[in-house]
Amino acid sequence: MIYDLNVWRIVRFALLATLVISAVVFPMEFRSQYESSTVAPLQQYFNELLRIRDLFGYGNQSDVIYVRYDLSSSTRLAEWTLAITGMPIYVGTSPLYYLANKTETSLLNDSVYVGQTNNLVVHHLFGEPLILSDLLSAPTTFELINSTMIARGLFLSSVSRPEALALLSLNATIFSGMPLPPTPGIGVARMNTTKWQLYLAKGGFNNATLTELNGNFSMNIIAGEYFVRLYDIFSPAVNLTSKEIIALHLWSATNKQLLVGLSSQDNPLLPGGATADYVFYSFTLHPGWQYELIGFSDNSSFTGNFSPSYIVQMILYLDRDQVTTEVMSDGTYLLVPA
């Protein structure tokens, strides 16, 4: 009898402990998955959403706003976007999935992605023009192919489904660093880089050794206090349009910051150094092969009289981050939409 009583006490205690734990854990799990964040986005996000609302009208159902999943997963930016604009949204890792009407299988366990995607399907909104914002979606140069800039940092894309499917495949290749495949609607051509050279700052040093052959290079970089500057001067000047994209194919042994400068100045103040008419693009190299993409769809960062129709010089600035590494390139390519 005493033994049965002790067993019952243990069972009772176990049941009570289970109920207490469930009462604590379940509300926390429910809130983390389904409850909108009580913390409002930063003011800059509010300003961007109000700008979109002013341009497209509250509740507009003819255009869809793209919110990048990485930006929304912790702040619940998707719900705020829907509430402030009243417009349908697509939450995902790339706008090309929406434009191609493809399911992102990696996000099928995410309630926000599933809910918003189902809403688009139910209301037959796939195929409508997609709004891409620098702030809400941080679109890459490649994702802006054939989009129209309607305001600074704000674009509208209405790429057809077949074209989006082709771009989606090419996009995966670009991010893997693999050789670029033939793609319908996109021309791929090798850019004529002739002779990469190291720029030596007056009174300074590069802490780098360069091996260059036929426009390819391999560079060993020693940790130091100075930027390593690698440059190529084009003769004649390169003539590009705002639709074309430069793709640098680079290999790095480690993580390293890279700044790429393009100049339109006929006679640079310093070859590989200072120019007055230029544009800069910032990247982070990671170990292995990768493409770094340079596009011209947004001219807000152009300085002086820089123009993609007259590019005289390309300069690679590798950061002075006290990292010893090797960086290589086996070619620079042009992606040209048909």
Image (cartoon, helix red, strand yellow):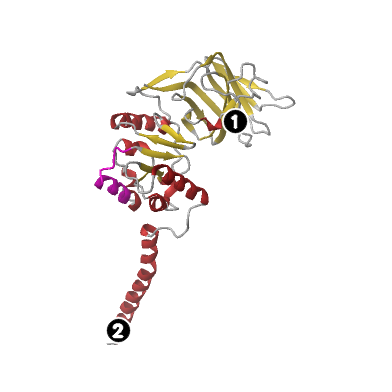
Which badge, 2 or 1, comes first in the chain's sequence? 2
- Mark nearest the camera among 2 and 1 is 1
Q: Quadrant of residue 199?
A: top right
Q: Quadrant of residue 99?
A: top left
Q: Is residue 212 above or below residue 37?
A: above
Position of 331 with respect to 162 (left or right) is: right
User: Residue 126 colored magenta?
Assistant: yes
- Characterize the local packing of mark 2: few (<14), some (14-19) or many (20 or more) Cα atoms within 10 angstroms: few
> Mark 2 touching mark 1, by CB under 8 A?
no
Spot occupied by residue 236 in the image (x, y as percentages of width and height): 54, 12
Q: Quadrant of residue 263?
A: top right
Mark 1, secondary structure of its residue? strand
Spot occupied by residue 191 in the image (x, y as percentages of width and height): 48, 18
The N terminus lies in quadrant:
bottom left
Residue highlighted by disc 2: 3
Residue at the spot 40% in from the left edge and 64% down from the top edge: 28
Q: Which residues are magenta?
A: 114-128
Position of 241 with respect to 34 (left or right) is: right
Tag count? 2
- Characterize the local packing of mark 1: few (<14), some (14-19) or many (20 or more) Cα atoms within 10 angstroms: many
Residue highlighted by disc 1: 318
For the residue marked with disc 2, what is the amino acid?
A: Tyr
Residue at the spot 36% in from the left edge and 70% down from the top edge: 23
Residue at the spot 32% in from the left edge and 75% down from the top edge: 15
Q: CA distance from mark 2 to mark 1?
A: 75 Å
Towards the viewer: 317 or 238: 238
Magenta stretch, main secondary structure, is helix
Q: Is residue 126 above or below residue 325?
A: below
Towards the viewer: 262 or 172: 262
The C terminus lies in quadrant:
top left
